[in-house]
Every structure is written in C-alpha cells, then in structure tokens.
Amino acid sequence: MFDIDLWREIFQSINMNRTRSLLSGFTVAFAILLFTILFGIANGLQNTFAEAFVDDANNSISIRSGRTTKAHKGLQAGRRIQFKNEDFNYIKEDFDDKVEFITARIYKNFQASFKGEQNRYNIRAVHPDHQFLEKTKIKEGRYINQNDLNNKTKSVVIGRLVEEDLFLKTRALGKYLNLGGIQFKVIGVFTDDGGDNEERQIYMPVTTAQYLYGNNDYIDQINLTYNPEMDYDQALAFSTLLTKKLKNRFSVARSDQRAVRVRNMAEGTKAISQMTVGLTFIILVIGFGTLIAGIVGVSNIMIFIVKERTKEIGIRKALGASPRSIVSIILIESILITAIAGYFGLLLGVGVLEWVGPNLKEYFIKDPGVSNGLVIGATLTLIIAGAIAGYLPAKKASRIKPIVALRND
Amino acid sequence: MLKIHQLHKSYAIGDSSLHVLKGIDLNVEEGEMVAIMGSSGSGKSTLLNIIGMLDEADSGEYILDELPIKNLTEKKAAVYRNKFLGFIFQSFNLINYKTALENVALPLYYQGLKRKERQEKALFHLGKVGLADWAKHLPKELSGGQKQRVAIARALAANPKLLLADEPTGALDTKTSYDIMAFIQQLNDEGKTILMVTHEEDIANMCKRIVRLRDGVIMEDKKVNQVRAEQYV
C-alpha cells in the first residue's frame, strides 16, 4: 500500500539532515559515475576493434597458390601451382554443406580513363558471392550477377572513389569506362567500410576477365566463407581438411607451406573475441568493485545515521512505533538516497561520455557509451544496493530498546 | 487500575547480576497522582520503565486496566504503549527536526489516524497547554518550560489511561517547575491517573501519594495532603 505519510516522514528526515544525506549520496554517485565512464570506455574500445575487422566477413577463408618448395611424387621443387575453374568447382561441390559463399578472384591492374580523366586501378574479377564476402555495399545500380558471368558481359562495378576520380561530379552509372583499351559499361557504384583503398577497386565478372585476358580458365585466388553455424573448432578442422585435399590434388608435399596457402580468419577472430571477453570481464570486475565500495559506504553512513538517530528512534518507539515502521523508514530512506544519487551519477557519467567521447577517437576509443539496457539494469541494481546497504542498519535500528535510547545522559 | 504483585528485576553486570527490584507490590486506583521517590539506584526508574512497557520484569504480575502485561512482542508492546500510556521525560525528548505540532501529532500517526484528523487533535492539545501560537516552531526555538508543555501535549494526544512522568521537572528552574506541576495537577483534577518519578521533596508533596523506594523494596507508601502548585506561580 502506498503510504503517503511514510513518504512524508522520509522526505522530512532527508530534508532536515541535508549534509548527511548529501554525504551518503556522494559515495554512490561517485561510484556510479566511475562505473559508467569505465563501461563507456570499454564499449568504445570494443567498437574500435569491431570496426577494424568489419571489412571482411569474419568467417572467411582465403586460398592462394605459389611455387612448390619441395619435390614430391617425382615432381620437382619450384613448380608453379595454378588454380583453374575446375578447382573452384571442386571446392564448391565437394564442400557444399560447409561453404556459405564462395568466389574466385583474378587480379589485374589497368589504366582506366573517362573523357579527359585517367588513373591506374586494381581490378578484381570475381563471382557474385564476392559482394557478401567483402561486405560491399551497393550505392547505385547493382553488383555482378550470374547473367554477367554466363554472357561474359563487359560490365564493371566501380568504387565510390573511382567515380569521384574519373567522373568528377557526374554520375558514372550507365556510362562507358575505358579499361586498358576496352570499353566497359558501369553497372554499379559501391562503398566499402574497409577504407579508401577498397573504394578504389573495380570489379568485373570472372568469366569476362578470363575470356579477354588470355582466353584461359586461370584463377589467382579463391575466397570463401564457411557455414556460420560451425564453431571455432569445426572451422579449423574444415580449413585443415581443405588444405590437405588441395595439396593432394596438386601433388604437393604436406609440409610444403608455399604451394597452397589456406588462411582462416577464424584464428584472428578468436583472438579478438577472447580479448573482448577479457576486457569486458575486467571492466565488470572493476565496475562492480566500485559499486560495492559505494554500497559499503552507504551502509557505513546508514549505520552512523542510525546511531545518530538512536534517541529519535527510541522516542518513536515509546510513542508506539512498531519495529516494522522503523525498518521501513531507514530502509526506504537508504533506497531513496542510493537511487537518486546513483541516477545522478549515471546521468553525469553519460554526460561526460557524450562530451569527451568524440575527442577520444585517436586513443582507439570510438563512440563510447552505455546502452539503455545497462541504464535500466544499473537503476535496478541501485535500488537493490540501497536495500542491501540499508537493511543491516535498519534491522539494528528496530532492535534499539527505547529504555536505552531514552536514558538521560 | 494498576496492579503490581511481587515484581522482580535483575540486570546482568559482567559476571554478577544486580537485583534492582526485590518484590514490589503496588496498587494504583484511577484518578490517583503518585510520586515514586528514592535515591539513585533505588530502582525507581526501573519500576517506571516496567510500568511503561519499555522494559520487562523477570517475574511477578503486572496488570494494567485488567490487562495482564506479560510476554509482549515488540509489536504488541508498541501498540499498548501507544494506546494506554503517555510519557513525559526529564529531557523532553522532542524530535528536533519536527515542529511542535508535528511532535504532538506523532503518537496519532502511529495510531493510524488521517493527517487532517491528526493535525486537528494535535492543535487542540497544544491549545490546552497554551502553545497554539507556537505550533509551527521547532523545539530549539522554545524555552525549557515550553518544550515540556509540548511533551505533555504529546503525551495527552493519544488520550492515554496512564501518564508516566520521569523527573518531569528535573531540567527546569523552580518557577517553571511549579508552572508545569500546576498544569499536571490540573490534568489530575480532570481525572487523569498520573505516576511520577522524582527525587525532589517539594515536587513529591504536590502529588496525592508518595511511594518511597530503597534498594529495590518499598519502604513507605503514604497518602499526603496535596500542596497546590498554583500558589507559587
């Protein structure tokens, strides 16, 4: 039941003893302030890490080839391994259930020109899946599709900065770009979070590149993402198996590190996620430590308050206050002070983060902040904390004997 | 209205125990005004505390208005104190951050009365002790006599059967003491039963009966001719 008189009593008591209320509130406010700032900074660090690895899908595996370093099965060292379409198809079909997206890559580099403007760009000839592997975002038009592959169309998807460099202020979509002497139609413009370098790439269908430049079926690199349902160990087992099969396929010695190179991003991802977990854990430990220090502070002050108010509590009891009403007064006062002070500290902390947050980017802290969930959680924690801080003193107060409290001294 | 039979009480002091009350027998009728006298350590305050349900006897009978007071829980003791007893203390024991009116209204709050009703009743009793104009003042703004009047108004507010006063004039000068005593006599004239602990002969002689305690037993219990306090005011 909401007892307005009880609240009136409590507010009167807080109001009449401002210094002591402020003092106990300060500890909590400070604890929450520190907690919020620490948590915000941890979030900022995590954001920085997350951003550093957003460029590519983090379940990706890349496969490259080189020259053999060891003689094997009667073949000499120094032999060049060349991937072809059949190798791409082999992986795609044999590991169908383990592969999510897969693309081949052929690297080229050409002088590109449009009207008076020209520049050299890296070109990647790819499959449509490449868009998802590289997390390419289409700004205008579309990405390369299966139809382009089938018809070997002379179409390209260019990066935002290529459009800026060559087409100046005009739109590139639908216009023709001269790439190493051949006209390509711009079918799309993309953006990429991976930085300026990624946005100066040009994509074309893998079949077109094979047809135009040598009329072969060579591939420079194969990129794929494994099924995201696979866990870290399964992913590692998969790349190990893939390495073994490919080495067999090209008659490469198992110990040869250069001929077939399979790189699994999972290894790096795991290190990062472990670091993030570690960081969160440290922050939580420090944060809760501060919070507990705050609670102990309030509890201390509440004990002092009870001692200071012993006489008053004795008077109240002599006048007919039940033990329960004494507990309520002390407990609710404690909760109220904790909650208000804590909330104040929280607001202050969020304010500080908002204020200094944008200046911290050079210290690897990006968008520090706390989520709504944390704010609600912290508020609840505060109320519980207030109850814990107030409980023992309140219990002690309710046991005060009026005769002891009223003794003339 | 108050019957006490063979009341014993000891306090543990370290390993030994101090026998403070050694079999007290006392009957007080309605409308009496009794002074309990004795030197310090005679057990007079302990007796008053037991009567006031602030302390419990080790053995013996205590019947207040036909209600045996025994094995009280804290909660029940609180209810009885609130309903039956009004306390007046030597050091007034007002709550220092509450106004005179709020102090008087406090026992009514614990009776569960509505705010408006509390204020009205409290103001009525403040008026009775002549301090209606001081209702909004804090205790620190009042003189000693005024504080004790507020305390008396508070003791009366819950309309108790028995008023218990522990050295009510102990902290006051003679003139103010007589002033307060005149007022307490007036309450007694109106029919309130009053029990008072004091060690001052002149104050005790303003009661109708004097009970003298020594070393935990009643030495003397006699009716006296009441000295009216008005004549000194």
Image (cartoon, coloured by chain):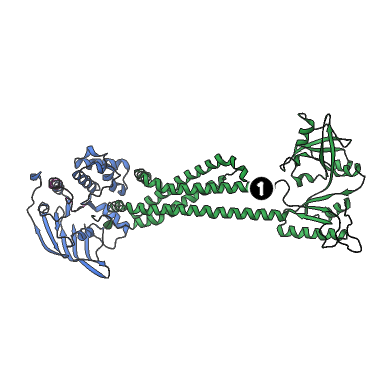
Give the magenta part as a residue range: B161-182
User: Against A252, is A14 above or below?
Assistant: above
Of all chains in the rendering, the one displayed in green is: A
Q: Does residue B71 sit above or below A329 in this rendering?
A: below
What is the x, y in percent for residue B166?
19, 54
Q: Which chain is blue?
A: B
Which quadrant holds the N terminus of chain B?
bottom left
Q: Residue B169 magenta-drawn?
A: yes
Task: Depth check: give the residue in front, B172 or A400.
Answer: B172
Residue located at (50% from left, 46% from top): A33
Residue receiving disc 1: A50
Tell me which residue sits at (74%, 57%) in the image: A235
* Amino acid at dot 1: Ala
Viewport quadrant of the C terminus of chain B:
top left
Q: Quadrant of residue B77?
A: bottom left
Is residue A76 among the parts visible in the rendering? yes
Between residue A12 and residue B154, name the one nearer to us: A12
Residue B207 drawn in magenta: no
| Chain ID at mark 1 | A
